Image (spheres, grey):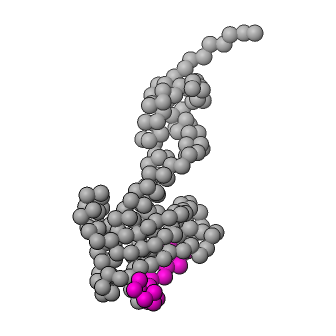
């Protein structure tokens, strides 16, 4: 048996080269948890405000056919604008979606509803869903409304939030913050010491 002494460094004590090495190594396993949960919760809450019942969100960000989609239902939600301003006051794109839904509904006395079903299981984007719009009073299918387009725009909104969240979590800033907060230690060449 022998004793070996090693110099141990905090992240900020590493050389720039070793910091880069550590960040790249960290990225290999950084997202081994459901990092998208917050985005999903937010999408469901905003969807509810707009009258969209969001279920079963699926996404793929960096492969062929990348994007996001969901299954669910839609019906007009009275008072959506005030609720949306309270929940997400700075996102003008959401207000535009709500206004587009309201215009489509007004033409049909606010009686339109929609079902959203995924139709393609290999990919996940707004064009892998079927959206059927119908009049809730007589169940007749209604065509020519902008509701399907608005619902697909909402799917693109979710996709964009997922990209933002992913890019943030993989950013140098976020990784460094995590290393500092968890008090990670490294040996000289940037290998992490397991101190947990």
Stretch in magenta = 126-143
The answer to whether residue 100 is above or below residue 16 is below
| Front one among 44 and 124 | 44
Q: Residue at x 41, y 79 (%)?
A: 113
Q: Residue at x 56, y 46 (%)?
A: 33
Q: Residue at x 44, y 85 (%)?
A: 134
| Front one among 104 and 182 | 104
The quarter of the rendered structure image containing the N terminus is top right
Q: Residue at x 50, y 64 (%)?
A: 55
Q: Is residue 152 visible?
A: yes
Residue 4's x, y, as percent?
Answer: 66, 13
Q: Is residue 146 visible?
A: no
Residue 161's x, y, as percent?
Answer: 42, 58
| Front one among 184 and 89 | 89
Residue 158's x, y, as percent?
Answer: 44, 63
Q: Is residue 184 left or right of residue 2?
A: left
Name, please, the residue furthest toward the top: 2
The answer to whether residue 8 is above or below residue 29 is above
The number of callouts visible is 0
Residue 191's x, y, as percent?
Answer: 60, 29
Q: Is residue 83 left or right of residue 18?
A: left
The answer to whether residue 74 is above or below residue 6 is below
The quarter of the rendered structure image containing the C terminus is top right
Name, please, the residue furthest toward the front: 137
In the image, residue 172 lies in the stretch drawn in magenta = no
In the image, residue 131 lies in the stretch drawn in magenta = yes
């Amino acid at each position: 048996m022998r004793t070996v002494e090693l110099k141990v460094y905090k992240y900020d004590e590493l050389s720039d080269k070793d910091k880069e090495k550590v960040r790249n190594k960290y990225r290999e396993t950084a997202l081994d948890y459901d990092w998208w949960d917050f985005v999903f919760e937010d999408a469901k809450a905003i969807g509810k405000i707009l009258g969209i019942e969001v279920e079963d969100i699926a996404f793929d960000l960096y492969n062929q056919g990348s994007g996001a989609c969901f299954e669910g239902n839609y019906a007009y939600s009275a008072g959506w604008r005030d609720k949306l301003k309270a929940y997400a006051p700075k996102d003008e794109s959401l207000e535009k979606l709500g206004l587009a839904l309201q215009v489509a509904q007004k033409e049909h006395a606010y009686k339109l509803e929609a079902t959203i079903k995924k139709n393609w299981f290999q990919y996940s984007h707004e064009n892998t869903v079927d959206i059927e719009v119908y009049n809730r009073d007589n169940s007749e299918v209604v065509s020519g409304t902008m509701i399907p387009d608005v619902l697909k725009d909402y799917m693109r909104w979710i996709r964009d939030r997922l990209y933002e969240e992913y890019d943030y979590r993989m950013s140098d800033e976020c990784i460094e913050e995590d290393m500092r907060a968890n008090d990670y230690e490294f040996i000289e060449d940037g290998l992490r010491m397991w101190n947990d």
